[in-house]
Image (cartoon, grey):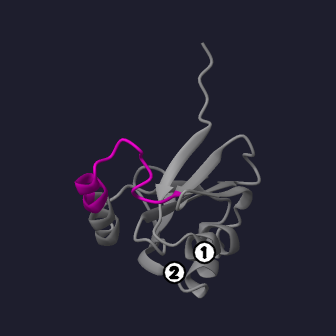
């Protein structure tokens, strides 16, 4: 069996602000941008991994969620309690400088971790924690 990641999802409350963060600051490319019934589905891909689609979606996008569940999801997103993504880069310090200069909220400046990476962390415009790693050589 050969299992590969195809899509992962990040909840956002403002697609345009999220696009600025993920495309303009991190360098992802938009592969799809679709609006349907009050929702918006934006697929982005890292240029080095075009087979992986990172989907920016409304926090209440699940058609099976109750109205109460949708409100809870929106509240969790607003508090920054939904999980984010970890990206790997070749130069974490240069990436940190670019993302910080773009106005992103810094959670952690680049530091060497005991588990073999140098990393930093930001909040995206919706409050999701985004970690950026560089493998130590």
Residue at image x 54%, y 57%?
Answer: 37
Would you say 38 lies left or right of 114 here? right
Residue found at the very far top of the displayed protein: 1
Q: Is residue 27 above or below residue 69?
A: below
The quadrant holding residue 41 is: bottom right
Q: Is residue 63 magenta?
A: yes
Q: Was residue 20 drawn as part of the magenta stretch in this picture?
A: no
State the SS at label 1.
helix
Instruction: Confirm or deny contact between disc 2 and disc 1 (CB under 8 A).
Output: no
Q: Which residues are magenta?
A: 57-72
Residue at the location (65% across, 68% down)? 26
Give how far apart the Cα atoms at labels 2 and 1 are: 14 Å
Q: Quadrant of the N terminus?
A: top right
Q: Mark 2: which secondary structure?
A: loop
Q: Which residue is at 59% across, 35% downward?
A: 5
The picture quadrant where one finds residue 96 is bottom right
Residue at point 49%, 56% (across, down) = 10
Dot 1: few (<14), some (14–19), or many (≥20) neighbours within 10 Å? few
64 relative to 130, above or below:
above
Q: Is 130 positioned to the left or the right of 51 in the image?
A: left
């Amino acid at each position: 069996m050969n299992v590969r990641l195809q899509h992962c999802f990040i909840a956002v409350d403002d697609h345009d602000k999220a696009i600025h963060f993920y495309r303009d600051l991190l360098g992802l490319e938009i592969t799809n941008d679709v609006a349907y019934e009050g929702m918006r589905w934006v697929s982005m891909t890292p240029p080095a991994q075009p087979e992986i689609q990172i989907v920016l979606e409304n926090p209440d996008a699940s058609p099976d969620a109750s109205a109460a569940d949708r409100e809870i999801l929106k509240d969790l997103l607003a508090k920054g309690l939904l999980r984010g993504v970890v990206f790997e880069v070749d130069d974490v310090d240069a990436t940190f400088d670019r993302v910080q200069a773009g106005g992103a909220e810094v959670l952690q400046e680049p530091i060497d971790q005991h588990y073999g990476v140098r990393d930093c962390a930001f909040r995206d415009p919706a409050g999701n924690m985004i970690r950026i790693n560089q493998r130590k050589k």
